[in-house]
């Protein structure tokens, strides 16, 4: 099985390539294609990255080659990590409209090329932001079941980690999902959370203590207030103020932590390349494994779920069954009323944004 990484020489792309090899997701007989641009520095750096990866992992590295044209991308799984990224640094304003307008052209160019020259069976994992825009563009050209965005899976892993840390246990004991939009539009699905080793009554009590008397209807405002507070604490951008901001996060609820901790990590300048790479490689491994596994991801829905009484059509993060041919069906379960309301609101926001970005 072969994997291509678009944007392989960026921070996230490099981390994905390294983890694919380190975790032995790709066998020595498989191929890893590093994709850059012929007219930019990534095209040159891809050749150097190939040598560096072989130097580091020669004993078990897959076959590694370089592509510098969208038409040359050939793989069973294609990871889209190309395009502009969110700026780092305290006080940086994230202009998602500008990011979308810049990356729309990248998404369209590669999607058109894969549709024209690909095998027709590739599974595409969208990493680049806005994830929902990338999923929408690739799904229209390649078929919606062959395209999944990794944002909801990364948000899910962060949510599980924060719950586990609050309980003093390992993340492996926590299941549960995050849907909605990657980032501030995340919808923590508390009703899906399970804790291995606890019976039903113990789980209900533990989750009630963690969540508190709060509704997801106001979750967006809660996240915005938390980010504003962090901005005030870390305004001087020195090490002490950033340490104080990270410490402040520890006192908040797990769902808020799951959204704002990576935000502050990115603001600090550290970025979130390793967490993003880990979640992405999870999905690649799932597709290559040959088994159907439940994950969360942004997908293009066409009535598979009902929100506010109507079949939902549009790009949204939900739990899905993922396998070698892409995602097959949604496993959302019975939502709590506030979860359904929040998903519906976020879905409408995503639809409006995509319409604006593709007008």
Image: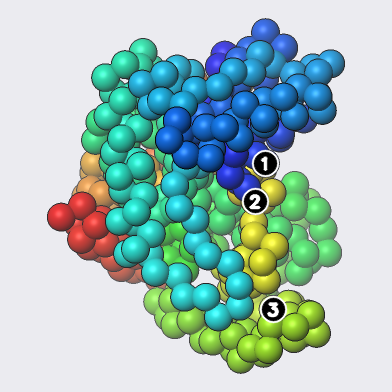
In the visual, does 200 lie left or right of 127? right
Disc 3 residue crowd, few under 14, some 14–19, many 20+, Cα 10 Å: many
Say whether marks 1 and 3 touch (CB < 8 Å): no
Please tell me which residue is depicted at 59% across the width and 18% down the height of the picture: 65
Q: Which residue is mark 2?
A: 273
State the image coordinates of residue 97 (x, y, percent, origin top left).
32, 64
Say whether marks 2 and 3 touch (CB < 8 Å): no
Residue 15's label in the rendered image is 1
Please tell me which residue is depicted at 67% across the width and 71% down the height of the picture: 268
Of label 2 and label 3, which has the lower sequence position? 3
State the image coordinates of residue 120 (x, y, percent, origin top left).
33, 16
Q: Secondary structure at mark 1?
A: helix
Quadrant assignment, res 60: top right
Please tell me which residue is depicted at 64% across the width and 88% down the height of the picture: 235
Q: Which residue is mark 3?
A: 249
Say if residue 12 shows up in the picture: yes
Please tell me which residue is depicted at 57% across the width and 32% down the height of the picture: 44
Tell me the CA gap for discs 2 and 3: 20 Å
Of label 2 and label 1, which has the lower sequence position? 1
**Front in this rendered view, residue 65 or 275:** 65
Say whether marks 2 and 1 touch (CB < 8 Å): yes
Tell me the CA gap for discs 1 and 3: 26 Å
In the visual, does 305 lie left or right of 271? left
Of label 1 and label 3, which has the lower sequence position? 1
Which residue is the extreme one toward the top? 29
Residue 173's label in the rendered image is none
State the image coordinates of residue 55 (x, y, percent, origin top left).
81, 24
Quadrant assignment, res 147: top left
């Amino acid at each position: 099985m072969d994997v291509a990484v678009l944007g392989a020489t960026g921070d996230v792309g490099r981390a994905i390539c390294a983890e694919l090899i380190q975790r032995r997701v790709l066998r020595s007989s498989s191929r890893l294609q590093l994709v850059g641009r012929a007219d930019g520095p990534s095209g040159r750096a891809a050749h150097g990255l190939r040598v560096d990866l072989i130097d580091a992992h020669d004993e078990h590295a897959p076959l590694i080659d370089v592509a510098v044209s969208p038409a040359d991308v050939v793989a069973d799984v294609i990871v889209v990590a190309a395009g502009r990224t969110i700026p780092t640094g305290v006080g940086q304003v994230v202009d998602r409209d500008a990011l979308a307008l810049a990356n729309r052209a990248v998404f369209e160019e590669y999607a058109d090329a894969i549709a024209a020259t690909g095998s027709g069976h590739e599974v595409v994992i969208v990493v680049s932001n806005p994830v929902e825009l990338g999923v929408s563009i690739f799904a229209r050209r390649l078929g919606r079941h062959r395209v999944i965005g990794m944002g909801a899976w990364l948000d899910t892993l962060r949510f599980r980690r924060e719950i586990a840390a609050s309980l003093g246990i390992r993340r492996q004991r926590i299941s549960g999902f995050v849907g909605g939009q990657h980032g501030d539009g995340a919808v923590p699905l508390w009703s899906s959370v399970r804790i291995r080793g606890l019976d039903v009554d113990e789980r209900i009590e533990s989750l009630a203590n963690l969540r508190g008397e709060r509704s997801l209807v106001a979750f967006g405002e809660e996240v915005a207030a938390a980010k504003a507070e962090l901005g005030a604490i870390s305004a001087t951008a020195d090490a002490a103020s950033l340490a104080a901001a990270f410490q402040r996060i520890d006192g908040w609820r797990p769902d808020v932590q799951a959204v704002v901790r990576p935000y502050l990590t990115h603001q600090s300048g550290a970025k979130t390349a390793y967490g993003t790479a880990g979640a992405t490689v999870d999905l690649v491994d799932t597709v290559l494994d040959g088994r159907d596994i439940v994950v969360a991801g942004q997908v293009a829905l066409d009535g598979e779920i009902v929100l506010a009484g109507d079949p939902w059509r549009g790009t949204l993060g939900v739990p899905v069954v993922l396998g070698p041919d892409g995602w097959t069906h949604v496993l959302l379960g019975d939502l709590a009323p506030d979860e359904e309301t929040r998903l519906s609101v976020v879905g409408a926001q995503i639809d409006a944004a995509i319409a604006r970005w593709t007008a």
